[in-house]
Amino acid sequence: MVQYNFKKITVVPPGKDFIDIILSRTQRQTPTVVHKGYAISRLRQFYMRKVKYTQQNFHEKLSTIIEEFPRLDDIHPFYGDLLHVLYNKDHYKLALGQVNTARNLISKIAKDYVKLLKYGDSLYRCKSLKVAALGRMCTVIKRIGPSLAYLEQIRQHMARLPSIDPNTRTVLICGYPNVGKSSFINKITRADVDVQPYAFTTKSLFVGHTDYKYLRYQVIDTPGILDRPFEDRNIIEMCSITALAHLRAAVLFFLDVSGSCGYSIAQQAALFHSIKSLFMNKPLIIVCNKTDLQPLEGISEEDMKLVMEMKAEAMKTVLGQGGEPTNDEGVLLTMSTLTEDGVIAVKNAACERLLNQRVEIKMKSKKINDCLNRFHVALPKPRDQKERPPCIPQAVMEARAKEAAEKEKRKTEKDIENENGGAGVYSASLKKHYILSNEEWKEDIMPEILDGHNVADFIDPDILLRLEELEREEGLRQAVEEDDDFEMDGKELTSEEQEALAEIRKKKSLLIQQHRIKKSTAESRPIVPRKFDKNKEFTTKRMGRQLSVLGLDPSLAINRARSRSLSRKGRKRERSPAYDGGDAMDVDVDTPKKKLRARSRSLSLSRSRSRPPSEVTPGEGFKDSAQKVKAIKLGKKSVKMRNKDARNGRGSNNDVLQSSRQLPKFARSYGGSSSIRFFIRRFMVAASKEAGNAFWSDKFTFTSFSLPGYMLFWQF
Amino acid sequence: MRLEKCWFCSSTIYPGHGIQFVRNDAKIFRFCRSKCHKNFKMKRNPRKVKWTKAYRRLHGKDMTQDSTFEFERKRNRPERYDRNLAENTLRAIKKIDKVRVEREARHHALRMKGKKAKEHKEAQKELEQSIHLIKAPAVLQQDPSLTLPKIQVKVSQQQSEENHAMEE
């Protein structure tokens, strides 16, 4: 609520700062760069924008000030009066009025200058217009500088005002200075008001809160009031007067019966009477404080008379409300804040009186019906004559307690455990309370597992029956099966057959093994053709052995193999006389002596003999010597022409070098090897390496030879 | 204490062995040893893995339906202890086991019934067809019986004679 919360008012900056803020904002938020070469409309727009922007900001800020400060006519009269008392209504209004005028002035300035700017014809002129406009606005603000400072001060003070709710239950404490008002409030609430021996310790209103009958009450401590004519009162006293005047509260008028405040009872009574008009329609209680110093009975007669007068006045207020006239205890109370004697009673009395008054007023108003509708107290309907109070009667409680004590205690397992040696020594038998058909079975241990089965899976009340059935079945089946026997297989393999079978199987497995070995390593190892036979696997001995295992006579085969072997050819001399199958020998008899001698000379070199080219050696792949001769001829024919040309092959270079790039690397020009002779030597060395190079074969006639630079044309 | 069955191979899991795996849908898989566990983790189907009971039952290698299996059933309600009943049960278990083992043996024998005849036939055929591996056909013609030829060690004497001839 705006009325009660003055803490939310924004800070009012002092005049100079105000100007600075606005101008710097204008500088930051509007474009800053402009050149005189721009179009005139652009220039005008630029400056108009600045002026308008400044005016807007001023307007905004001043409006917030005007709106946030409370209007004294619109708020609760208590606050209105309080603010008036504190800050002087007129000054306040004036200040705000000045701010308002400033705002209007600035708007007018802006309007005028914008109108002028519309017709500015150069950069300079527009700029000066803008400067003038801003300058005037700033002057206006400078003029209201003092108002702004004043408003700022008010704002700060207002923020610190206590937050008093004028409409809620309030208890007001008033009286002369130093009578003990602040001590009282310190006692009944959590407020921590300064308590000092000098007068006017409390200079403004203080609020505390207290509870009574589950309701919150505001307790307001006021500064002391002196007995003066109304006009002479200072601001501080006026605060309390305002509070008294406007708040609908219970009033506690404090009376110092001991006189230690510095004022006599007579003076205090005089004060009372002067402000009793303010106590209209308010529950009034006269509190006699400091009774520890001077009890109420002990005061003088005159004082007593005065007090009684006051009481009478107070009673009037009670009467005015329509309360009981005889109840004077609620009107005059004694207490001592020092000894805390009667403090609570005073508080209770005040709260009670206030509450009653408020309730009465509410009852009389029209709103009561709405409230009543919302209340409903539910009571259970009595079903019989027996009375059922809400709390257990004391007698019953006692009887129950006695009963519980008399009941015997059962012996618990824990007790047994403790008897027999405690927790670690005694272990309770958990099977003690089992319910079984036979008591002897309690300590039985039943196995849970038997032969890899869970016994619990087999437990069945009629297991015996089923077992009998099973056995009967089994007996039947066995009887049936004894009849049909398994056929005895009369057929059996003889021992010969078995032997043969075993051999066959062994052979087969060997073959498979070999095949697997060959298969597995075939990809990674190169296969040497059989004719080279580096492991000497294919010997006649081996062949002989294998054949004889099969039952064949190997001698014929061995001889034939030997006769056709390659080495045999070289050895024909040794085999000459007694050998039947040597056909080479026959040939040799007819040849001339010369050849025989030539051949006999190389006796030792049995292997490395040259033989006639038409000789067909076994393993070459020719049918006979005629075929071999033909093959040789064909081969020779295909290479004849090329050999004549002395070329490497069909793909070798036919032409002379086209460019130096085709020369070998060393033949190109390199720095350092500029000596011609050196060059040529290297060149010839290289050329000789490439036999059959076309360059060389052209009989060294090179007329156009594209060597770079310093090579001469050569002519052999 | 309960003996469980391995989920993969269906053998009994004794206490202190194996691993239990609880899946997120609260299904419990018990394994008797790491072999089964690892096979499971590889997502192998026990019905396709030759050595498991599931495979054997599925493919008819082992007995599937029998009244002896009815005796063993997981009962969830415990029975009140009765000594006589317990004694009878224990004795019955042994007898049932005996019967079951006999029946399984019979099943196996039934399965293997025609084996001898088949083997004999195969042996005959093999002998007929592959005899050439150990006995050359030429030899077989001369001697039709199945006796294996003896190995003859041939020593060639001719070499030395020839050499003598040359020197002369």
Image: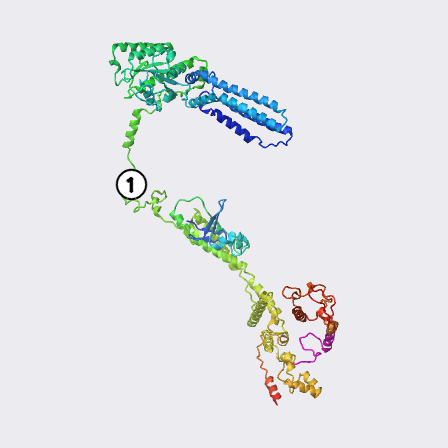
Q: Nearer the viewer, residue A320 or A54?
A: A54
Q: Nearer the viewer, residue A411 or A13?
A: A13
Scheme by which the image is coloured? rainbow
User: Quadrant location of the C terminus of chain A?
Assistant: bottom right
Q: Identify the residue at horizontal 71%, vertical 87% (top origin).
A: A592
Query: x, y percentage for residue A645?
Result: 74, 72
Q: Within the image, what quadrant is residue A487 found in?
A: bottom right
Seen as rendered, the residue at the extreme front is A124
Secondary structure state at the residue bearing disc 1: helix
Query: x, y percentage for residue A33?
Result: 59, 32
Q: Identify the residue at horizontal 54%, vertical 23% (top origin).
A: A136
How dense is the environment of label 1, judged by Cα within 10 Å: few (below 14), some, or many (20 and up)? few
Left or right for A8, reference A266: right
On whether residue A615 falls in the magenta region, the answer is yes
Seen as rendered, the residue at the extreme bottom is B168
Above-or-below relation of A26 to A713: above
Q: How many marks?
A: 1
Q: Nearer the viewer, residue A31 or A404?
A: A31
Q: Is residue A322 visible?
A: no
Q: Amino acid at mark 1?
A: Asp
Q: Within the image, what quadrant is residue A543 found in?
A: bottom right
Which is the main secondary structure of the residues drawn in magenta?
Answer: loop
Query: x, y percentage for residue A434?
Result: 36, 43
Above-or-below relation of A88 to A491: above
Q: Within the image, what quadrant is residue A387 found in?
A: top left
| Residue marked by disc 1 | A415
On whether residue A603 falls in the magenta region, the answer is no
- Chain letter, disc 1 residue: A
Q: Which residues are magenta?
A: A609-634
Query: x, y percentage for residue B158?
Result: 60, 84
Q: Nearer the viewer, residue A58 or A569?
A: A58
Q: Is residue A174 visible?
A: yes
